[in-house]
Image (cartoon, coloured by chain):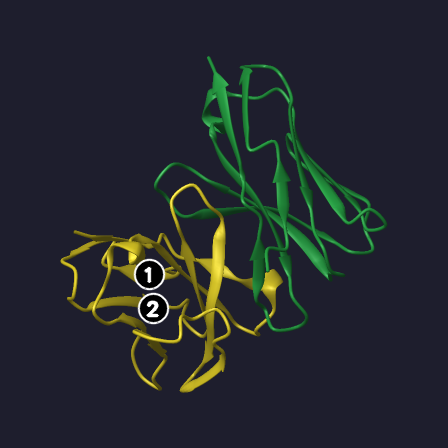
């Protein structure tokens, strides 16, 4: 079953603007991770937030987690053309190490 | 210190042929996961292996697909008698402990069935 659902599916913004992507999930989690994937490439790990954390920052990235609503958001501030990529949230399932990925948000940042 | 290495990066097979995808985990990692990504979709879990053992194959199609992770050598994902619907990107991840927080992903193998 699909654990993570993301919205919007696609987002187009101008360079310098902020981009917000949302992820919802169904079952309880230990942690939630966000990944970036450039077109035709592999996954790059961006940030991990644990279930007992509410907010985390890493450079221009800000992630929030609301376990009561089973949702997370990824904010990219002051976006750059190089941020153009697909962004996926992933949750763990139990303690197996298996990740459940969302469908992803495709972000286009126009120069 | 090499990361997860997958080869080939691109693979073209005709319908009915066999596809073999290889994954060399990070040195010292004994846990390997395979995921499949169909076009315009997220990654879907296929199988979890730990040296010489299949731990969880709940995401593997029942027929034509098999995976192994021998004591020596890379993990292999094998697809027999490929069909057009098998065209996808196949990603491998490895972990030293089996924890999702410590997984490293390879660059993937893009399989095209013609």
Residue A57 is situated, as x and y percent measured from the top left of the image, at 71, 38
Q: Is residue A86 above or below residue B51?
A: above
Instruction: Specify whether disc 2 shares its chain with disc 1.
Output: yes
Q: Which residue is labeled 2 in the image?
A: B24
Disc marking residue B5 = 1
Residue pictured at 61% horizontal, 69% vertical: B99
Read off the chain for label 2. Answer: B
Whichever of callouts 2 and 1 sits on the residue coming sooner in the sequence is 1
Helix or strand or loop: what does disc 1 sit on? Answer: strand
Q: Is residue B91 above or below residue B52?
A: above
Residue B77 is situated, as x and y percent measured from the top left of the image, at 32, 71
Whether tag 2 and tag 1 are in contact, CB under 8 A, the answer is yes
Q: Quadrant of residue A96?
A: bottom right
Question: In 3D space, how far apart are the residues under numbered discs 2 and 1 (Cα atoms)?
Answer: 5 Å
Helix or strand or loop: what does disc 2 sit on? Answer: strand
Q: Colour of chain A?
A: green
Q: Is residue B7 left or right of residue A87?
A: left
Residue pictured at 24% horizontal, 60% vertical: B83
Dot 1, crowdedness within 10 Å: few (<14), some or many (≥20)? many
Residue pictured at 30% horizontal, 58% vertical: B86
Residue A3 is situated, as x and y percent measured from the top left of the image, at 63, 55
| Residue A90 makes an appearance in the image | yes
Read off the chain for label 1. Answer: B
Q: Is residue A71 left or right of residue A34?
A: right
Disc marking residue A96 = none
Q: Colour of chain B?
A: yellow
| Residue B31 makes an appearance in the image | no
Residue pictured at 48% horizontal, 58% vertical: B44
Q: Quadrant of the N terminus of chain B?
A: bottom left
Q: Is residue A95 left or right of residue A56?
A: left
Q: Is residue A107 above or below residue B112?
A: above
Dot 2, crowdedness within 10 Å: few (<14), some or many (≥20)? many
């Amino acid at each position: 079953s699909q654990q993570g659902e993301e919205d919007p599916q696609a987002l187009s913004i101008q360079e310098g603007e902020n981009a917000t992507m949302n992820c919802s999930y169904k079952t309880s989690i230990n942690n939630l991770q966000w990944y970036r994937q450039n077109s035709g490439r592999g996954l790059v790990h961006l940030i991990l937030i644990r279930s007992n954390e509410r907010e985390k920052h890493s450079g221009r990235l800000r992630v929030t987690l609301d376990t009561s609503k089973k949702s997370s958001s990824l904010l990219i501030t002051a976006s750059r053309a190089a941020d153009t990529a697909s962004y996926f949230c992933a949750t763990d399932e139990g303690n197996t190490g298996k990740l459940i990925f969302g469908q992803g948000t495709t972000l286009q940042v126009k120069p | 210190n090499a990361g997860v290495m997958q080869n080939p990066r691109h693979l073209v097979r005709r319908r009915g042929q066999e596809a073999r995808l290889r994954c060399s985990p990070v040195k010292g990692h004994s846990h390997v996961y395979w995921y499949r990504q169909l076009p315009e979709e997220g990654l879907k879990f296929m199988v979890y292996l730990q040296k010489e053992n299949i731990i969880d194959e709940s995401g593997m199609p029942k027929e034509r697909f098999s995976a192994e992770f021998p004591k020596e050598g890379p993990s292999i994902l094998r697809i027999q008698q490929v069909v057009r619907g098998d065209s996808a990107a196949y990603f491998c991840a490895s972990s030293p402990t089996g924890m999702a927080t410590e997984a490293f992903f390879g660059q993937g193998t893009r399989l095209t069935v013609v």
